[in-house]
Image (cartoon, helix red, strand yellow):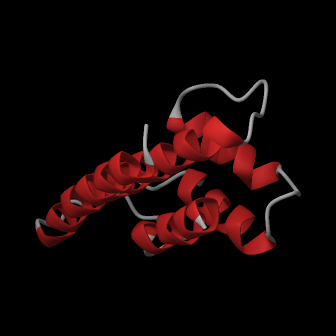
Amino acid sequence: MTKEETLNSIEKEFALARQAVAAGNAGMARVCARRATGVAIAFWLQANAHPGWRSDAMSRIRHLEVDTSFPQQVREAAMRLTARITEEFTSRFSSDPLEDSTIIIRHLLE
């Protein structure tokens, strides 16, 4: 996937997330933020092989969470994105999954 295709995919997920927020569907917004992050990680992995990283977005975000080669801010954003949520689709760690996703994406696509 090219960088342009990656950015387009991320923007599509963010657009869906914004629609979900507007509709009061925080759970779907969180899913979209995770998928956008997964797209960025997939792009990053094309140039930065990390054997053992599975192909699903959640597993990859969890890898970011514990990989000390990433800045603390990125690892903390990954932790917030992977944190369990309540039945109301809220998290005690993160009130803005799009911002957490943006932190990670900016780092990976620099």
Residue at 71% from the left image edge and 29% from the top image edge: 53
Quarter-of-image position of residue 49? top right
**Residue 87 shows up from this direction:** no
Tell me if residue 95 comes above or below residue 53 in the rendering: below
Picture coordinates of residue 37 (x, y %)?
Answer: 49, 52
Quarter-of-image position of residue 109? bottom right
- Which residue is the extreme one toward the left? 23
Picture coordinates of residue 65 (x, y %)?
Answer: 73, 53
Tell me if residue 40 comes above or below residue 92 in the rendering: above
Residue at 51% from the left image edge and 50% from the top image edge: 40
Residue at 61% from the left image edge and 47% from the top image edge: 44
Position of residue 15 in the picture relative to residue 107 (left or right) = left
Picture coordinates of residue 104 (x, y %)?
Answer: 59, 64
Position of residue 108 in the picture relative to residue 6 (left or right) = right
Q: How many marks?
A: 0
Residue at 53% from the left image edge and 43% from the top image edge: 43
Quarter-of-image position of residue 107? bottom right
Q: Where's the C terminus, which quadrant?
A: bottom right
Picture coordinates of residue 20 (x, y %)?
Answer: 18, 61
Position of residue 3 in the picture relative to residue 17 (left or right) = right
**Residue 65 shows up from this direction:** yes
Residue nearest the viewer, comparing 31 with 67: 67
Q: Where's the N terminus, which quadrant?
A: top left
Position of residue 82 in the picture relative to residue 2 (left or right) = right
